[in-house]
Amino acid sequence: MVFAAVAAVGLYFLFKSRLSVTKEEIIDVDTLHKKLEKEIIELKKQKKNHLVQPTVDDFCDQIFKICNEGKNKYTIDLHGLFVAQSLKYLNERIYNLNKEKYTGTLVVITGKGNHSKDNLAKIKPSVKEFLKKNNFQFKEMDGSFSVSLDKSKVTLLK
């Protein structure tokens, strides 16, 4: 039993290193996503479907960390992520700021969709829908949102 757990952890870390993301790669999101797709296809061929979601999550974690490096907690950059992961990170950030009783502005960088298939934004409209659905006051800009985290209007999302 212990051996199986160690083997699974070992596979996860082996896999993580095979899908490392660099700052230079962030510039070309399409190529990055193709890299992930190729890895997922390989996993499925090897009948390792249980590793697909952890791989996607790890991949997105790396992208998120690189894109948010050097930014303060009042700015969140969702570039290069998939919609589900971008909403997860946004939800977590708002939840954590709310726990701290922060009542200022959160800048949410989504990009314009220039790197999306057919140059159609996916993250930005999803973030806008999320903000509306949760009754946030926000100002929409070209590739970002300025979101008011006024305590009276924010409910715990998690």
Image (tube, rainbow, N blue to C red):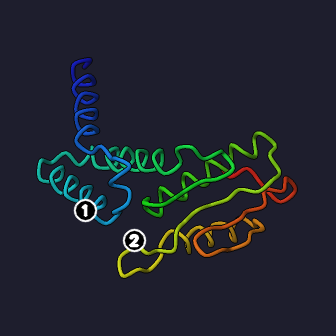
97 relative position to 108: left or right:
right
Question: Which residue occupies 46% across, 74% down?
Answer: 113
Q: Nearer the viewer, residue 111 or 122?
A: 111
Badge 2 amino acid: His
Q: Nearer the viewer, residue 140 or 127?
A: 140
Question: Which residue occupies 27% across, 62% down?
Answer: 31
What is the secondary structure assignment of the residue under circle 1? helix
In terms of sequence position, does the residue under pointer 1 or pointer 2 come before the other? Answer: 1
The residue that disc 1 covers is: 34
Question: Which residue occupies 38% across, 56% down?
Answer: 26
95, above or below 119, in the image: above
**Residue 92, disc:** none
22 relative position to 66: left or right:
left
Badge 1 amino acid: Lys
44 relative position to 124: left or right:
left
5, above or below 92, in the image: above
Are the residues at dot 1 and dot 2 in contact (C-beta closer than 8 Å)?
A: no
Question: Which residue occupies 15% across, 48% down?
Answer: 47
